[in-house]
Amino acid sequence: MNTEIREQVLHLGGDITVKTVSSAAYERFEQQCRLKEVHTLDLTGVAQADSACLSLLLSALRLKQGAITLRHIPASVLALAELYEIDTQIARHE
């Protein structure tokens, strides 16, 4: 998992799966989300994603109290959100 802040957008890239999101990567992600300047998550660069990615999105929504825009959510993550019946929570921020 790669993360980078550019122009108030936190860009996520690479594989975001249970195998690739370490505790250190998760902590870094949370720290970046807490920055006042970050108001958007862009997942354009995500190659593979599973429930770990969905967990990151939910964490971002919680940390920002819903005041964040989610862009380019992978179809696999949207499918999981629908399966878990939280798709409306995710979709309204896209």
Image: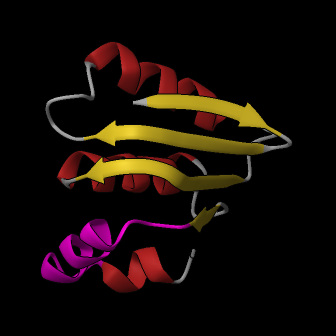
In the rendered structure, the answer to whether residue 53 lies left or right of residue 40 reads: left
Q: Quadrant of residue 80?
A: bottom left
Looking at this rendering, what residue extends furthest in the top direction? 24
Q: As drawn, is 92 to the left or to the right of 80?
A: right
Q: Position of residue 49 (x, y in %)?
A: 27, 52
Q: Does 53 appear above or below 88?
A: above
Membership of 77 in magenta stretch: yes
Q: Is residue 26 left or right of residue 91?
A: left
Residue 36, position in %: x, y?
78, 38
Indicate the position of residue 9 as horizontal and vertical percent values: 73, 46
Total number of numbered labels?
A: 0
Residue at 86% of width from left, 42% of height from top?
A: 7
Which span of residues is magenta-colored? 72-86
The answer to whether residue 35 shows anywhere in this view is no
The answer to if 40 sits in the magenta stretch is no
Query: Residue extending furthest right?
Result: 7
The quadrant of the picture occupied by the C terminus is bottom right
The residue located at (36%, 13%) in the rendering is 24
Residue appearing at x 28%, y 50% in the figure = 48
Q: Position of residue 78 (x, y in %)?
A: 31, 75
Q: Quadrant of the N terminus?
A: top left
